Amino acid sequence: MTRICLVSGGDEIRQRSYINHAIYAREHGLDYRLECGIDPQIVTKYDYKMSIVRRLIHQYDWLVWIDDDAYFTDFESDTLHELVEEAERDDQFLVIAEGPLEPNGFWSKINTGVFLIKNCPESVTMLESMSGEPLESIRDWWDDEAYGLFTNGDQDQMWWYLCTTGLLERTKIVGHRRLNSRGHYYENSLDDAFVMHFCGYPDKAWGAARFARRFPDQIGQELVPKHLLDKYSVAVRDPLGPTQYSIRDTKIRSIGAVKKRLRPLVHAWRERKSTK
Ligand SMILES: [Mn+2]
């Protein structure tokens, strides 16, 4: 049997997404780990993730990384097993989603918030090499038009590594709905996509609560169907109470409104600066 582990973590426990992740893993027969990624070789905040993956890869056949700000929304779907099977069949060592267009215009070729990686020599070499590559030299190589947003982290390092080693050919890049999507792509149903990733949210607990309110009677702030919370004896639910939620909501909305008003000024300033 293929040993698959779902893993998340970082340098601090920020979100209650571990409830969501642990339940998905139990429902689909995956091992699950929440890990602390402290390590001697950390340069950016994203490196905690890569240090965890580097350390665990040897212990499983496949690792599935999921950020702490990404939540499963379709608990029926067995997408992770399906993707491992497809990748094995097609001799691919990495499965990752495109970075879909965000409301602010950002996009990227891949998004490292969720990915599946096989325990094989190519992966081990990639994990060792990519994090050691200075971001300044990757920035020089980067083509904004072709690759999209430069994020100053592991995502750029991975894209650079895949492109410059030819390993892109052995990578499966799937559509965002299949592995790693965003709130504005959900319409009426929690199975409009497999995973909701709260990329770029100023307050992720507020983001999860706000998303859950779009699906009342189906999910709470853990983004897990109620019958599964019951099944796995989850006692603490919806930690952000209605009062706290509305305080944060008002604060975030007013900051958002100010930013929106300032945006044209910032753009004009940037343009003036770049033409100098
Ligand atoms: Mn993330």
Image (tube, rainbow, N blue to C red):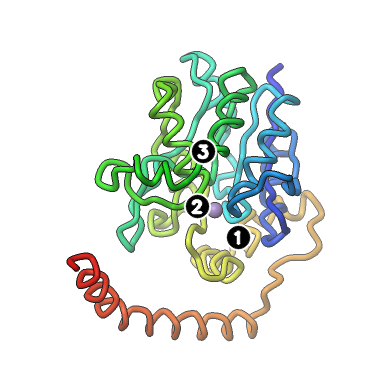
Q: Measuring 66% from the left and 36% from the top, which residue is drawn there?
A: 53
Classify mark 1: helix, strand or loop: loop
Q: Position of residue 59 (x, y in %)?
A: 75, 26
| x then y, percent, for residue 41 | 68, 44
- Residue beneath label 1, please? 219
Between the residue at mark 1 and the residue at mark 2, the CA separation in whole angstroms equals 9 Å
Tell me how far mark 3 sits from mark 2, CA to CA. 39 Å
Q: Residues within 10 Å of mark 2 (few under 14, many from 20)?
A: many
N-terminal of the two: label 3 or label 2? 3
- Looking at numbered disc 3 in the image, what kind of residue is underneath it? Glu
Residue at 38% across, 54% down: 185
> Are discs 1 and 2 less than 8 Å apart at CB?
yes
Q: Earlier in the sequence, mark 3 or mark 1?
A: 3
Q: Nearer the viewer, mark 3 or mark 1?
A: 3
Can residue 133 be seen? yes
Which label belongs to residue 133? 3
